[in-house]
Amino acid sequence: MFKGSIVAIVTPFKKGKVDEEGFRRLIEFQIENGTSAIVPVGTTGESATLDMEEHKRTLEIAVKAARKRVPVIAGTGGNSTTEAIELTEHAKKIGADATLQVTPYYNKPTQEGLYQHFKAIAKAVPLPQVLYNIPGRTGVNMLPQTVARLAEMPEIVAIKEASGSLGQMAEVVQLAGDKITLLSGDDNLTLPILAIGGKGVISVVANIVPKDNAEMVKAWE
């Protein structure tokens, strides 16, 4: 469903507030330079620091600025299942194409806890989900077996993998590659991940060199 160079776009600030016009310009720059999709309010987009109002408003700006020229994968994940559902409902309401759902952090949920968290969001809001595994920041690693269980749900379509383990990512492809798309969550590992069956990258470096990044990924198609 999603492939290519997908930007984890930054959220610019000016005088302590989200720079809305600057954000629109950044989105236009990405689209003009071949980016396949936009991920607003992910880790790179200040998801951990925006308040709820800022978060929702930034998603709205992204959807309106993209104007369906490329998909918008709204960052709506969180430590609270209830808040993640609220943000995901908002994303659906404003016309986002999918959501990015990070694993709950700090309290180190079990694999069953991770499964139940993502299942609750998927059942509450019928919108495609991209799972996000980044144990270096969250303190919990979502195992391939858990990903495979979640991939049985039609709402869960991809995973942004930033565990750093190519072996783990290859196991995801082996267990569920026909049901879920593997996307790199680490620019340094994009090429190796493409080599083991990944379809693209949710990229930070694409904020600076979107055209080069898009051409690199396209060369693997």
Image (tube, rainbow, N blue to C red):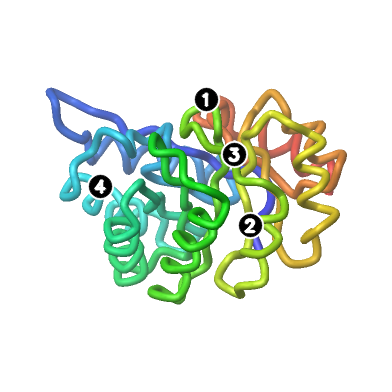
Give residue 55's mark: 4
**Residue type for callout 2:** Ala
Image height of 91 relative to 79, above or below: below
Percent x, y of residue 218: 77, 44
Q: Which of label 3 and label 4 is nearer to you?
A: 3
**Residue type for callout 4:** His
Please report whichever mark, 1 or 3, sits nearer to the chain's N-terminal start.
3
Percent x, y of residue 209: 58, 27
Quadrant hosting residue 205: top right
Q: Report crowding for label 1: few under 14, some 14 to 19, many 20 or more residues within 10 A (C-alpha).
A: few
Please report whichever mark, 2 or 1, sits nearer to the chain's N-terminal start.
2
The residue tagged 3 is: 141
Give residue 208's mark: 1
Q: Report crowding for label 4: few under 14, some 14 to 19, many 20 or more residues within 10 A (C-alpha).
A: many
Q: Which of label 1 and label 4 is nearer to you?
A: 4
Secondary structure found at label 1: loop
Q: CA distance from mark 2 to mark 3?
A: 16 Å
Q: Which of label 1 and label 3 is nearer to you?
A: 3
**Residue type for callout 3:** Asn
Percent x, y of residue 77: 39, 51
Please report whichever mark, 2 or 3, sits nearer to the chain's N-terminal start.
3
Instruction: Indicate left or right for 123 with 13 as reference.
Output: right
Judge whether residue 37 can be spotted in this image: yes
Q: CA distance from mark 2 to mark 4?
A: 23 Å
